[in-house]
Amino acid sequence: MAFSLSVLDLSPVSTGSDAVRALRNTLELARLADDLGFERYWLAEHHNLPSVASPAPEVMIGHVAMETSRIRVGAGGIMLPNHAPLKVAETFRVLEALHPGRIDLGIGRAPGTDPVTATALRGSRGGAGAEDFPEQFGELLAFSGGGFPEDHAFHSISAAPEGVDLPPIWLLGSSGYSAKAAGEMGLGYAFASHFSPVDPAPLLHAYRENFRPSDRFAEPHAILAASVVCADTDERAEELASSMGLAWVRMRTGKPGPLPSPEEAMGYPYTPGERRLFENYRSMQVVGSVSTVQARLEELAERTAADEILVTTMVHDHGERLRSYERLADAFGLGRAPVSQAARG
């Protein structure tokens, strides 16, 4: 296998369950992913969505790292407009100090929520937005070790704890801006193909073409995030995937709710407009039997030159979610790697 496999978890909340159970399910899936040999486990940041329980990836990263021994754990990602760069630098230095060599920091430009919630997160209507990202990101890099010029207001500030490097930084995105910027700064790049209809191939190639080696990354590393449902048969996979299809339609039409069951989703009376939304989302997914999914992921990795595929599986039943990842691990021959000395602490 020319690419590695990793996990992106949004802590899905299903009908008939609750957010507390969703967070506990995340810990169970993380332990399984660690045992199965997945490369990394990233936690997302979303707000004001009843279908996911993932508003604080920095908190969950610490818990997941404690529950696992080998797998890298990180943010996929921290939505920088919602956070002060100094606070991000200090939080991830603490995580790196506690779990050396196992933490990743993925950074996103968008708030990960609607405009009203974004305003509430920032504490004022004049808070940072996506247009302020270059300045915010520059501050994060400065706090992480580059430092500020002597005439800068923050020149005297050091991010604590001192003596700890910031974990590897990845720029997340679905546009040419993030791809080019990640390459020019010598960072990792992750493309959000699990919700973006944009063809990822040109952007991942642009990232490589613009890559300049840095202290953080000697070589480019491109991750492709993909929505995947892997079942025993193509038909069963389509049933399981229908839950997220309906959840997507409801979110896009201003009626978000917990992840519905396949029975509810398959029996839902879609309007023509809703059906188009459903089909558009379905076209972004990789859904099917083991052989179907394996072939599709291999084709995606070859076409985009992705080094890694970050798999997110949003299905109603947690047991089915676990089994989907188990099938992927078996199909691609993942095996548990030895625990590193750093991971032993």
Image (cartoon, helix red, strand yellow):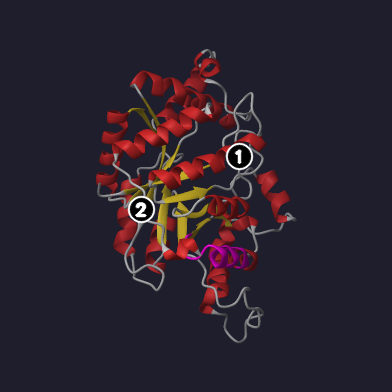
Instruction: Tell me if residue 43 can be seen.
Output: yes
Which residue is label 1 attached to?
24
Is residue 197 found left or right of 116 in the rendered image? left
Q: Amino acid at mark 2?
A: Ala
Image point (35%, 23%), residue name: 232
Image point (31%, 30%), residue name: 290
Q: Which mark is residue 114?
A: none
Residue range of the region highlighted in magenta in the rendering: 90-102
Q: Amino acid at mark 1?
A: Arg
Q: Residues within 10 Å of mark 1 (few under 14, many from 20)?
A: few
SS at circle 2: loop
**Foreground pick, 33 / 226:** 33
Q: Which mark is residue 337?
A: 2
- The image shows residue 56 at horizontal and vertical percentages of 63, 50
Image point (65%, 34%), residue name: 50
Q: What predominant SS class does the magenta segment belong to?
A: helix
